[in-house]
Image (spheres, rainbow, N blue to C red):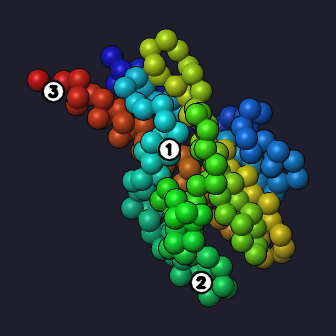
Amino acid sequence: MAGSLCNAVGGVRSVAPPAQSSIAGWYRGADLVDSFATTFGAGISRDPEAVAHAILGRPAWWVRGLLATRDMTVARFGLKTTGELQRNAPDRKSISFFPILARSESELVLGVDDRHLDFRASILLGALNDEDAFEVVVTTVVHCHNTFGRAYLALIKPFHILVVRSYLSRAVQARDGEVQSSSTSP
């Protein structure tokens, strides 16, 4: 039942940035604000950090390729690579290469500040129905500091949208498969 619920309502969709997010103050004047939502089915942990690991933990091969290309390119300009971001995370706490900046019972905030731009991502959990399914909204906010930051954002924005949607879709598919296999195991 839980797996079919996840399939029925688990599509990734663009949504308005949530006003209740702790990063809502960042929306004003941002160079990029976008939010994508999906539904995680029953049997999935409602812990924001566990959800973030489920979303960011298994990128598609093409996403890993894009990140490797990004790292080779930005290193030439003195910007932080994904490895540097992970190593320099406060208290070495990160998910994938995104440093954890804040957490609450229903939200995890990831982000980094660099010379060219400041970036925040929120993974916000919300209740959906009485079958323990819940909505997950991933919001990205970027503030550029200079022309290089705006050029970089313009270059990566189309990929960013594809990557976020891929991360969410893969997380739902992986979680849906785990729930289905555990419900059919003897």
Q: Which mark is residue 75?
A: 2
Residue 8, above or below 131: below
The residue located at (43%, 45%) in the rendering is 54
Name the amino acid, label 1. Answer: Glu
Pick the residue in front: 148 or 104: 104
The residue lying furthest to the front in this view is 91
Q: Considering only order in the chain, which callout, 2 or 3, is on the residue closer to the N terminus?
A: 2
Q: CA distance from mark 1 to mark 2?
A: 29 Å
User: Residue 38 location, x and y as percent?
Assistant: 54, 33
User: Residue 158 location, x and y as percent?
Assistant: 64, 58
Q: Which mark is residue 49?
A: 1
Name the amino acid, label 3. Answer: Ser
Name the amino acid, label 2. Answer: Ala
**Label 1 Cα crowd, 10 Å radius (few <14 / some 14-19 / many 20+):** many
Residue 152, above or below 130: below
Q: CA distance from mark 3 to mark 2?
A: 47 Å
User: Disc 3 marks which residue?
Assistant: 185
Are circles 3 and 2 on residues that touch, CB within 8 Å?
no
The residue located at (47%, 40%) in the rendering is 51
Residue 116, above or below 13: below
Side (left or right) of 30 relative to 55: right
**Would residue 6 be seen by someone viewing this image from the given angle?**
no
